[in-house]
Amino acid sequence: MRKGELTHQAILETAVRLASRVGLHGLSIGGLAEELGLSKSGLFAHFKSKAELQVQVLEAATVVFTERVVRPALGRPRGEPRVRALFDGWLTWDRDTLLEGGCIFVAAAAELDDAPGPARDTLVQGQRDWLDCLAQAARIAVAEGHFRQALDVEQFAHDQYGVMLGFHHAKRLMRDPQAEARARRAFDALLTAARIPTA
Amino acid sequence: MRKGELTHQAILETAVRLASRVGLHGLSIGGLAEELGLSKSGLFAHFKSKAELQVQVLEAATVVFTERVVRPALGRPRGEPRVRALFDGWLTWDRDTLLEGGCIFVAAAAELDDAPGPARDTLVQGQRDWLDCLAQAARIAVAEGHFRQALDVEQFAHDQYGVMLGFHHAKRLMRDPQAEARARRAFDALLTAARIPTA
DNA sequence: GCGAAAAAAGAACGACCGTCCTATAAACGG
DNA sequence: CCGTTTATAGGACGGTCGTTCTTTTTTCGC
């Protein structure tokens, strides 16, 4: 009862890393087993299906993301500092977590946007939570007087996400060495617009 | 020499549509053949490999995109109107082209960002051209006095791309009915920031 | 340490994949 | 209309996929 849970966890850890490179679709039972030195059937026994594996990979990645990005940011002062911390953590969490293939959620979003099923549902829920988290941080910044009163915090979260996606595109596909600088400049512009009274 | 070229074109047309749903990876020779009522080998003969098929699919999609988005925009007045036209066309070109799976380039970007090869090279070149096109349109808007002199036009193009990616994410993955309104609002903010003298 | 229970391995399955080879059918220049 | 070129079909290949069943090994409470 303990050994099983242990390998189960080890599998997921490797699976998240592998999925970031090859995608949830490209993540194969056999390939994953080989990477871990396990037999295909031995690994499969931990999940009743590949779909279940995909769901658990997304859940495991979400746990890591929360630990690596959200929790540290919650330790920062309420308002703009926390908003910035969320963005900063977001920018580098895949690097810090050794996800060579970049943010697994961005890859999964493109893969699953037209593939109904439990994996998609899991991803969407996680993204919804994350967007809510971003919006809530902005809401606090409004309450603290850092951002203007009339700011549409959901729009702010949405725009922040767009900046992040642009960063991912520039960095991972275009291999643009300026990607991070561009993303920070774009986010700064967002912050500026959020601060100044109704433009 | 004519019949062949005709079906070749028909194959690519269907392939682009199919790839938008299932991705370049999920696009299978057999599945594509069935959709067209052709034999697998008959279709395969048109391309020497699957990699070549993928490249040609991307090229075909680029032609459509240029025809549907870039060319109409070039008919609009130089400056901000043209910049807006590029954005507007971009927002809806996948819908207009009956790409049920959404913009094929966004899907391909996530699929290929870690897969070196001719398909990736083709995509990257196309995206580079497109970003150059956006930057050039912004440059003209500066020259026309619509945008401020000091505007970083490459940054503007990059930010514009981020808005578009945010739109795609909100619409296709999150099924957010407000996706388009959000995207327009974000782009308007970009335009405002581009107009006003150094904030 | 023994015995039950859990974990892992081994082998096989049907299905689909890209690719190749060969034969047939259609297209087309003369 | 014929003969050649071209386009398509048919079938088979080795490989990988997810999944299942059966067997062996390991774990772990008693």
Image (tube, coloured by chain):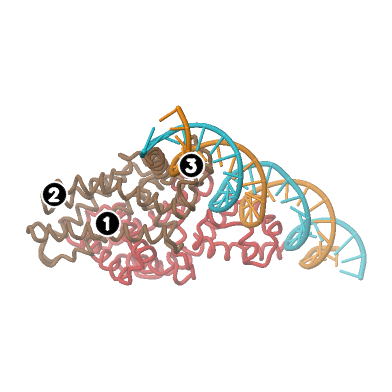
Chain colours: A red, B brown, C cyan, D orange
Residue at the image position 59 percent from the left and 54 percent from the top: A53
Q: Position of residue A178 (x, y in %)?
A: 30, 71
Badge 2, how many Cα within 10 Å: few under 14, some, many 20+? some
How far apart marks 2 and 1 lie (CA) works out to 18 Å
Query: Residue, x 37% and y 51% (percent of image)?
Result: B58
* Chain of the residue under label 1: B
Image location (x, y in percent) of residue B97 = 32, 40
Rounded to the nearest angstrom, the CA distance separating label 2 from label 3 is 40 Å
Mark linked to residue B122: none
Hey, what amino acid is under mark 2?
A: Pro
User: Quarter of the image containing the N terminus of chain B?
Assistant: top left
Q: Nearer the viewer, residue B58 or B131?
A: B58
Residue type for callout 1: Trp
Q: Does residue A137 appear left or right of residue B155 in this picture?
A: right
Which of the numbered marks, if any, corresponds to residue B32?
3
Sequence-first tag of 2 and 3: 3
Image side of residue A88 versus residue A150, left or right: right
Q: Which chain is disc 2 placed on?
A: B
Q: Picture coordinates of residue B2 (x, y %)?
A: 37, 39
**Is disc 3 in contact with disc 1, using a CB cutoff of under 8 Å?**
no
Name the residue beneath numbered marker 1: B130
- Asked if residue A40 lies left or right of residue B26, the reply is right
Between residue A28 and residue B43, name the one nearer to us.
B43
Quarter of the picture containing the C terminus of chain B is bottom left
Query: Is disc 3 on the same chain as disc 2?
Result: yes
Camera-near label (3 vs 1) is 3
Number of numbered callouts drawn: 3
Q: Are marks 2 and 3 in contact (CB under 8 Å)?
A: no
Subunit of label 3? B
Q: Which of the two marks, 2 or 1, is nearer to us in this view?
A: 1
Give the structural element (helix, strand or loop) at label 2. helix
